[in-house]
Image (tube, rainbow, N blue to C red):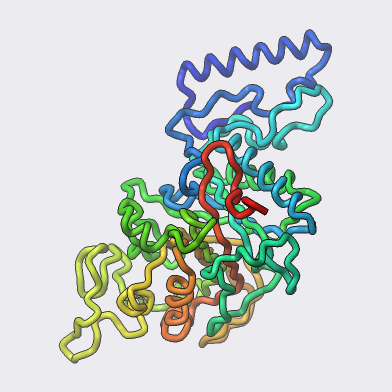
């Protein structure tokens, strides 16, 4: 009954067969099938190419090549004890190390009558390049004016609350959070499975506030994926293969203290009026984005990765890339050189009643779908906040998009294989 998302090589097949036979024999000798209740008891170690190491100077899931699926969850802390928070982070770190290796979140109990570890939904599944990335929200440092854990003085200067932007229609219940976990994998069940296990380990200390699944297109040729509007997404990212750019725009430096080698992440749930967008003419869509839909090249140019010529004009003297085109208003040239690393996922949460805020002001049941925007940066003040102030005020794409949820988290540096996530924050306290 074990299912696989890739063919099993002969050696692995023999391993699974032998392990299954041994388990069945043990169950029969023990007078029942209880020993089979432990998932992954029959699972082979995933192939090395399927694993992404959890430990390192930086957390995985930031520069990791984007996986096909994401499950992002935010938690509220229910305890007033700093020791409880530290204990949870230690449990989460140990579990994340195990999950990233294709193991159960906790060691198998071996009890015949125990509930199945990990729920059983990951039996036989590949690790699918699973990464787990953790973040700390503003509420970890102070909440409602209360310094619950004695950490208020350790909140980095760059870790500011996001301002309200023009056009925001944020739902409080789907925004914010004291802690965050993002699981990314090439299998959606693997990503969701990991978050479920971490949420279970948080019982009594933290509770789920909101969650958002997402998916990303991954062309077989390795080219830039497309969002639900049909355009290539992430073309203008700084290259993750350039350490100098990552140091300048993504990784926190000495100025961050305990956050050095970490990164700040801003997440925004952006609903897109796809019905309205789909009725728009191709030429207008391209003017809204500032790029050609087929190959992603800037208007007036031929290659996706050519630098945009924002000063180019047509025969009538009009800008080839309109002044309100998304690619222009979000560009470094229009934002004092500011750059962020986008790692966004599309979402489709069915349909819901919607009142559009631009003509034709349609009201009715529409797709509850769009972009779960995720952006990492060294300093949100000179990164996302600076860029989004421009975008919120000038972007022609705003007539199709509405920001309905928002959060910011400080993602601490990675671990050395012995410590726990966020340990430098608590050091010396």
Q: Hey, which residue is sitting farthest bottom in the picture? A: 316
Q: Is residue 350 visible from the viewing direction of this image?
A: no
Percent from the top left, x then y, of residue 282?
Answer: 34, 75
**Quadrant in the picture for the C terminus:** bottom right
Can residue 381 be seen by looking at this rendering? yes
Can you tell which quarter of the image residue 268 is in?
Answer: bottom right
User: Is residue 187 placed above or below 108 in the rendered structure?
Assistant: below
**Relative to residue 190, is residue 304 depicted above or below?**
below
Q: On the image, which quarter does residue 105 sit in?
A: top right
Between 245 and 12, the residue placed more toward the observer is: 245
Residue appearing at x 50%, y 71% in the figure: 274
Q: Is 397 rendered above or below residue 108?
A: below
Q: In this view, does 279 lie to the left or right of 180?
A: left
Residue 18, percent from left and from top? 60, 12
Q: In which quarter of the image is the N terminus?
A: top right
Residue 75: x %, y % from top left? 69, 58
Horizontal relation, residue 340 to residue 258: left or right: left
Relative to 247, 84 lies left or right: right
Circle count: 0
Of all residues, the one furthest to the left in this rendering is 315
**The quarter of the displayed image where residue 382 is located:** bottom left
């Amino acid at each position: 009954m074990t299912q696989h998302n890739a063919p099993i090589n002969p050696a692995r097949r023999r391993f699974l067969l032998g392990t299954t036979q041994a388990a069945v024999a043990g169950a029969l000798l023990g007078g029942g099938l209880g020993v089979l209740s432990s998932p992954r008891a029959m699972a082979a170690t995933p192939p090395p190419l399927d694993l992404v190491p959890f430990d390192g100077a930086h957390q995985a899931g930031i520069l990791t090549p984007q996986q096909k699926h994401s499950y992002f969850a935010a938690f509220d802390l229910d305890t007033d004890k700093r020791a409880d928070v530290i204990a949870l982070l230690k449990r989460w770190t140990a579990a994340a190390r195990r999950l990233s290796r294709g193991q159960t979140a906790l060691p198998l109990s071996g009890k015949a009558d125990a509930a199945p570890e990990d729920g059983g939904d990951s039996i036989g599944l590949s690790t699918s390049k699973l990464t787990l990335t953790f973040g700390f929200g503003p509420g970890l440092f102070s909440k409602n004016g209360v310094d619950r854990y004695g950490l208020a003085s350790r909140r980095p200067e760059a870790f500011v609350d996001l301002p309200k932007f023009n056009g925001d229609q944020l739902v409080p219940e789907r925004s914010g959070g004291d802690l965050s976990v993002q699981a990314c994998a090439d299998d959606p069940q693997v990503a969701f499975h990991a978050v479920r296990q971490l949420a279970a380990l948080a019982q009594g200390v933290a509770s789920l506030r909101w969650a958002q699944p997402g998916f990303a297109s991954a062309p077989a040729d390795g080219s830039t994926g497309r969002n639900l509007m049909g355009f290539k997404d992430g073309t203008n990212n700084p290259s993750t293969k350039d350490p100098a750019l990552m140091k300048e725009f993504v990784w926190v430096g000495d100025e961050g203290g305990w956050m050095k080698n970490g990164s700040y992440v801003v997440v925004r749930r952006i609903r897109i009026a796809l019905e309205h967008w789909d009725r728009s003419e191709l030429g207008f869509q391209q003017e809204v984005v500032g790029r050609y839909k087929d190959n992603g090249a800037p208007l007036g140019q031929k290659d996706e990765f050519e630098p945009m010529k924002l000063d180019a004009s047509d025969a009538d003297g009009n800008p080839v890339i309109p002044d309100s085109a998304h690619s222009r208003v979000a560009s470094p040239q229009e934002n004092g050189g500011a750059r962020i690393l986008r790692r966004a996922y599309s979402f489709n949460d069915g349909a819901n009643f919607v009142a559009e805020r631009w003509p034709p002001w349609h009201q009715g049941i529409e797709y509850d779908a769009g972009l779960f925007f995720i952006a990492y940066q060294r300093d949100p003040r000179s990164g996302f906040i600076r860029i989004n102030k421009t975008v919120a005020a000038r972007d022609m794409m705003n007539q199709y998009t509405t920001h309905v949820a928002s959060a910011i988290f400080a993602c601490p540096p990675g671990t050395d294989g012995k410590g726990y996530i966020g340990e430098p924050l608590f050091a010396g306290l």
